[in-house]
């Protein structure tokens, strides 16, 4: 904090000046500042950003939903390996045990400069029982919500009765289907592919997901058939807001989800780390529908020998990708740990809105000396360890008893509203001008960097871009963030401030 104090300079009249602002005049001044950028060397990205400002509401628009490709097939045919090959990184859980992937997991993929959503599903079995039945249901949902399906078959085993059942399901869906003949590791195995014509899905594509053989040809063919805008993924914009429930093992994430759902939706067990895969549940809270994602608990030390559990911990990041707001559950009966802080930092890195749920609060309400001490220490821990997220709404709850559960919805609504918050360009530049006039950036090496122009480039989270003549100290950027929070409502959302240092164009 010491670095920020350098910029304090005592009290200022910033809030009053912003209240008195003539917004029309501010927009005219911002326009003049923007015109002044013509004297500086700008790149294509700068031009695109500046052009976007004129597109109504600050150029912030909902982009059309990306086309969706679902990967389906019976267990252990190599679906997750294919996902990893397409993504170019190890994201999906891959293990020799059939059925490791239990849920629909969505990733953003790119091939030949085209982006699309890739949905990895659990193995589909026609007569599945129990958890296998829910896996099959997830695969069916994935097919319904996709524009195109990659049906993966183990070419070395050949078409099974299960594969034939899947074919019936795919035919009924009417979707474009590519038959992927996987596990063809070299040319000698290619004759095995011919037998798959019998499935009646057209030409099989021989591939080796593990070695990458044939995957490029497959993707080239997929892009020819894939629409540029999804016809099914409109749910990305509308629908219930998506909430990831995060926390280290055994802090009460599943109990929170069950209380919200009003029923036993997730296995709750005293053994830490019982929940391994994210489970999506739509619940009604505060008169609204919410989609809750209960994620795998993040373990303190992950050893490679843990296999699926190691990669399941990566699912937390995948859940954040799918979520809009994260509820980080902390156990008040225990000291705030490094793990807790690391999970909060994951949320900040993902740019998602944030609510802190302090669970097991009922344990601190008993009037005895031990609990009074714990409450006092807890406040000190929050001040010290969570100072960087002092802006996140706090809710003290008991997932077991339902205490203060009604306060969770307003906290979520506040965080999401502010995650979407936009400051008009005129107002933002007026704020920057007044702030710099009251608290100038210190001289560095005899020079003082100037802020030429600022704009909000996007929301979710609110992201601001400052065009400057030199680098701004990190402390000064944090100071700008803090003053933004004090003047405008940004509770529950991270704020990103990016710089673009630009030099004056040389006159010829």
Image (cartoon, grey):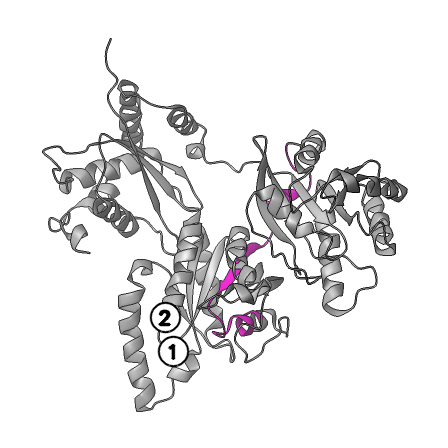
| Up/down of 296 relative to 29, above or below | below
- Mark 1 packing: few (<14 Cα in 10 Å), some, or many (20+)? few
Give the left or right position of residue 7, taking residue 175 as reference: left
Rendered location of residue 127, percent (x, y):
83, 63
Residue 7 shown in magenta:
no
SS label for mark 1: loop
Question: Which of labels 1 and 2 is toward the front?
Answer: 2
Give the left or right position of residue 305, taking residue 346 as reference: right
Label of residue 11 in the image? none
Rendered location of residue 165, percent (x, y):
86, 53
Q: Which residues are magenta?
A: 228-257
| Up/down of 105 relative to 294, above or below | above
Is residue 21 visible to the viewer in this orientation of the structure? no
Q: Quadrant of the N terminus?
A: bottom left
Query: Looking at the image, do the residues carrying marks 1 and 2 touch, with CB atoms under 8 Å apart?
Result: yes
Label of residue 337 in the image? 2
Is residue 421 visible to the viewer in this orientation of the structure? yes
SS label for mark 2: loop
In this rendering, the count of numbered labels is: 2
């Amino acid at each position: 904090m010491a670095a920020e104090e350098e910029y304090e300079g005592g009290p200022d009249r910033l809030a009053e000046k912003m209240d008195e602002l003539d917004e029309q005049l501010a927009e005219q001044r911002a326009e003049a500042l923007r015109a002044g950028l013509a004297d500086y060397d700008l790149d294509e990205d700068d031009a695109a950003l500046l052009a976007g400002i004129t597109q109504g509401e600050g150029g912030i628009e909902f982009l059309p939903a990306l086309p969706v490709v679902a990967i389906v097939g019976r267990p252990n045919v190599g679906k997750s390996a294919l996902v990893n090959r397409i993504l170019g990184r190890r994201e999906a859980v891959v293990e020799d045990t059939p059925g490791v992937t239990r849920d629909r997991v969505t990733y953003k993929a790119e091939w030949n400069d085209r982006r699309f959503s890739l949905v990895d599903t659990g193995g589909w079995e026609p007569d599945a029982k129990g958890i296998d039945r829910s896996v099959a249901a997830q695969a069916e949902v994935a097919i319904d919500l996709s524009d195109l399906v990659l049906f993966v078959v183990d070419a070395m085993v050949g078409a099974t009765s299960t594969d034939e059942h899947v074919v019936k399901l795919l035919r009924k869906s009417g979707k474009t289907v590519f038959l992927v003949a996987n596990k063809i590791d070299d040319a000698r195995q290619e004759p095995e592919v011919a037998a798959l014509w019998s499935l009646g899905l057209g030409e099989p594509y021989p591939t080796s997901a593990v070695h990458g053989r044939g995957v490029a040809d497959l993707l080239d063919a997929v892009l020819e058939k894939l629409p540029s805008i999804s016809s099914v993924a409109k749910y990305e914009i509308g629908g219930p807001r998506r909430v990831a429930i995060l926390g280290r093992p055994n802090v009460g994430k599943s109990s929170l989800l069950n209380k919200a759902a009003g029923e036993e939706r997730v296995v709750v067990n005293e053994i830490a780390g019982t929940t391994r895969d994210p489970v999506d549940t739509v619940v009604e809270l505060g008169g609204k529908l919410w989609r809750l994602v209960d994620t795998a608990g993040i373990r303190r030390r992950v050893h490679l020998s843990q296999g699926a559990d190691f990669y399941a911990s990566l699912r937390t990041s995948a859940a954040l990708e799918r979520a809009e707001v994260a509820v980080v559950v902390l156990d008040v009966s225990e000291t705030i740990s490094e793990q807790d802080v690391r999970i909060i930092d994951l949320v900040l890195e993902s740019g998602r809105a944030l609510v802190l749920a302090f669970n097991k609060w009922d344990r601190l309400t008993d009037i005895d000396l031990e609990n009074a001490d714990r409450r006092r220490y807890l406040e000190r821990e929050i001040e010290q360890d969570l100072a960087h997220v002092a802006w996140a709404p706090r809710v003290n709850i008991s997932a077991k008893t339902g205490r203060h559960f009604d306060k969770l919805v307003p906290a979520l609504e506040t965080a999401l509203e502010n995650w979407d918050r936009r400051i008009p360009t005129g107002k933002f530049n007026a704020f920057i001008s007044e702030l710099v006039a009251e608290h100038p950036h210190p001289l560095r090496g005899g020079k003082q960097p100037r802020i030429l122009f600022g704009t909000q480039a996007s929301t979710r989270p609110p992201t601001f871009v400052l065009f400057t003549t030199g680098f701004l100290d990190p402390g000064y950027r944090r100071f700008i963030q803090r003053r933004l929070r004090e003047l405008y409502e940004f509770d529950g959302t991270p704020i990103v401030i990016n710089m673009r240092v630009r030099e004056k164009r040389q006159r010829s």
